Structure formats: structure tokens, C-alpha cells
Image (spheres, rainbow, N blue to C red):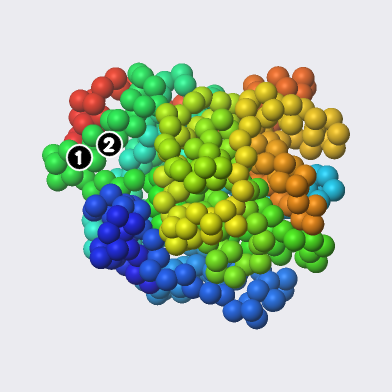
Amino acid sequence: MKYFSLNNNQHKSNFEDAVIRGIAPDKGLYFPERIPTLSKDFIDSLLDLGRHEIAFQVIKEFVGGEIPDEELKKIIFETLDFNFPVVPVEDNISSLELYHGPTLAFKDVGARFMAGCLGYFIKKGNHGKATVLVATSGDTGGAVANGFLGVEGIDVVILYPKGKVSEIQERQLTTLGQNITALEVDGVFDDCQRMVKQAFLDDEIQKKRMLTSANSINLARWLPQMFYYFFAFQQLQPKKKKLVFSVPSGNFGNICAGLLARQMGLPIDHFVASTNVNDTVTEYLKTSEYKAKPSKATISNAMDVGDPSNFVRILQLFENRYENVKNALSSYSFDDEATKKAISEVYQKSGYLMDPHGAVGYLGLKQFLKENIDFEGVFLETAHPVKFLETVEGVINEKVEIPEPIRKLENKQKKSLQISNYEDLKGFLLD
Ligand SMILES: *Cc1c(COP(=O)(O)O)cnc(C)c1O
């Protein structure tokens, strides 16, 4: 499989180079030259297939033999060693729980798969040692650190803003050790991101280290997010009605993977992009005009994005035609008050506890079903509610039980290096 840059379809790359680079030299996102179709036999036999077999069949053509089948199966096996249950919440509404991985967020899937692929390419030896450099406002850092822990030939350096991430998130970043280094930045998330960008442009650093990023535009993080749409479809058999997925969206990588799965032949009838007040795409669907906005802070902070990076991939999937996008996708936006109200009401009515991101997904689904009664739907629960403990406990007025992977972190030693400016970062990377 070849991938072209969405800035220039003449620039092409294979899977390996696209994964190593992350983004094309002209700063375009990579997109597959051709969307593979899955056979009807495969779709009909989904019920009988195991998770790992499904994932292998779905991703195989995208990897295009650049990772040997046995190796790819091993990566899949290590990526998907937890469950993806579909849990009924109300009539016609279920939750697809994506938070049973090691850091309790759906980003574990993409981060682990990417770590497996990059680890393989580095071990093969054409590229030398790599340093994954990331800035995090919370969730990404933990998933990346965990995914890359112990991967040979790769060092991970994570910048996070001092005092601006939750205690649980900080523990997930700072207690791992081995090839993971956490840099605690005296500043806000934007400072972290600016320093990372500057490092990528710094020749002195580039000469010394091969830097690569692990953000959601990397193919190896984007593509494996297709897997769990298949797992959900499998669990929903037999379907009673038409099927809609509601995806709480920020950078729109997760929903774009679902749309890709649909394009390959998975029978999903419709998608809902549920957003918080960062409603750039909701407005686009209303007006057909895309206007990026500055981001606004909300309680579903992993979706505080005013200019979603994967939106260009969605346009490409639909041949850049507004009508096509509109046929497959609806979008609704909700503020923090509505989100809290949903968490509280659903908890009282059915005992099901949602995190703020899942709650936005629930609200979008509910809205869509109001106007489309011939559908049943699934919303994606993208993080465990305990990751947003203060918000959630404040809303339901109860203590939430802390799950095992988090409790285990409590007696571990925090280890981080304090830095306050770019020179500190550079010094560390050149040392
Ligand atoms: C990253 C994240 C999202 C948004 O996913 P995108 O692929 O960026 O749209 C939603 N919920 C949680 C909990 C996240 O961490």
C-alpha cells in the first residue's frame, strides 16, 4: 500500500516511511492511495472470528507486507489484550467501553499498535535509534508512555505542564522509568507544545537524535482505531434496526477510523460526531463552511480542539463533497452544563456512570435518535470515569471506586525532571 500526502498527491510513501515520519515532508497528512474492501464472506463470518483474526484481516492490506504476517499478528496480540464490551444503557442505546486498557483510555490501542510497528522498523535497523517526543495535556502522554515502555531502540520523552494534569495522569506519566522520561514544564500545555515543535526544527538536535512524534495523525495510531468498530458490530448481532455510532470527537481521528471501516464494507448506516462547545465541525455541517476557531476549555478537555487535524482525512474519504459528508455524518455540540446533567441523569436512571467525553457521545446519540426512530445506536466511552474523578464525583455526589491499574500506581515513586525553557529541553536532548 502506498500513502499520499493530502497536500500533494504526487508525494507518495510506503507504510514504513510514513510511520517513521508521522507527517509528510510538505506537512500533509498521509492517506491511503486506495481503500481496500472486505469481502462479504468476511463480514458475514464476523460472528465466528476472534478479535485478533478480525484485526489482522482489517489492517493487513494497509501494512502491505512491510511487517511479516507473524510479526504483525504478534503486534496485534500485544495491542489487544483487553476487552471492548458493548454495554446496554437504555432502549436502543449502548456504550462501547474503550477504557479497559492499561491507561484506561481508548488511546491505548493506537499507542500500543504504533509502538509495535515503530519498534519493528527500528529493530530492522535502517533508521538507528529513535526518540519519541510528545507534549501532553493529559491523556495522550500516559497512553504513549505505556505503549512504548520497554520497546528496544526507542526513548520516549514526554513534556507535561506542571500542576496542570490530574494526579492520576501525572502518576501514569512519571512512575514508569526504563526508556520513559517525564519532563515537568514550568508553564502551560501550549508552552510544552511550542518547545516540542521547536525541537523538531532544530538541526543540532536532529543531527544527534532521530526525533519522531506519536500524535494522532500518525497512520499507525489512526488505522488500528478501526478495530473496535468491528468488535462492537460483532457484539450487536442480530441487529434489530439500522445502526448509528456516536463518537465524542476532538481531533476527529477516532471517528475518521470508523468512517474508514464503513468505507471498507462494515455495515454501519450512520455516524454522529459529538462535540463539546468546540463546534467547528458541527458548524461546518450546518453551513458547509469550515472555519477553524481558537479552542475553549471544557470538562471534556481531550476534545478541546478548534481546528481538528483529521478533518482533512474525512473530506478526502468523501471525495471532498459536502453532500457526501452530510449523508453519512451528523454532528451536535453540547456545553458543560448539558454534559453534567447527562452524567447525573443516566446514573440515576440506569446506574451507568459515564465520563464527560462519553457523556457528550451519549447526548449526540440521544439527539440523533429523537429524529431517527428506525435506528439503534452505540456511543463510544473513550475514557474511564475515574480519570475525571473530581468532575464525576461532584456531579453524582458519591465516591467512585478506583480500579486496580490506578490503585497500583499509588505506591510508586514519581520521577520527573523539572525544566523551564527551551534551552533546558535542548540540553537534555543533546546530553
Ligand atoms: C483523545 C480523546 C478524545 C478525542 O478523540 P479524537 O480522535 O481526537 O477525536 C475523546 N475522548 C477522550 C477521553 C480522549 O482522550
Q: What's the CA distance linking mark 2 and mark 1? A: 7 Å
Q: Which three-letter amino acid code belongs to the residue tagged 2?
A: Lys
Which residue appears at 70% of the width and 38% of the height?
363
Task: Using the image, determine if residue 175 lies above or below residue 163.
Answer: below
Q: Nearer the viewer, residue 403 or 239?
A: 239
Q: Position of residue 398 (x, y in %)?
A: 77, 22
Res 11 quadrant in image: bottom left
Q: Is residue 219 left or right of residue 208?
A: right
Q: Is residue 85 left or right of residue 147?
A: right
Which residue appears at 70% of the width and 76% of the height?
44
Q: Is residue 356 left or right of residue 184?
A: right
Circle 2 sits on which residue? 197
Callout 2 crowding tier (Cα within 10 Å): few <14, some 14–19, many ≥20:
some
Q: Position of residue 191 (x, y in %)?
A: 33, 25
Which residue appears at 83% of the width and 45% of the height?
90
Res 425 quadrant in image: top left
Callout 1 crowding tier (Cα within 10 Å): few <14, some 14–19, many ≥20:
few
Q: Nearer the viewer, residue 352 or 90?
A: 90
Q: Residue furthest front?
A: 287
| Disc number placed over residue 201 in the picture, else none | 1
**Helix, strand or loop at disc 2?**
helix
Q: Which three-letter amino acid code belongs to the residue tagged 1?
A: Leu
Q: Is residue 181 visible?
A: no
Which corner quadrant holds the C terminus? Answer: top left
Q: Position of residue 19 (x, y in %)?
A: 35, 57
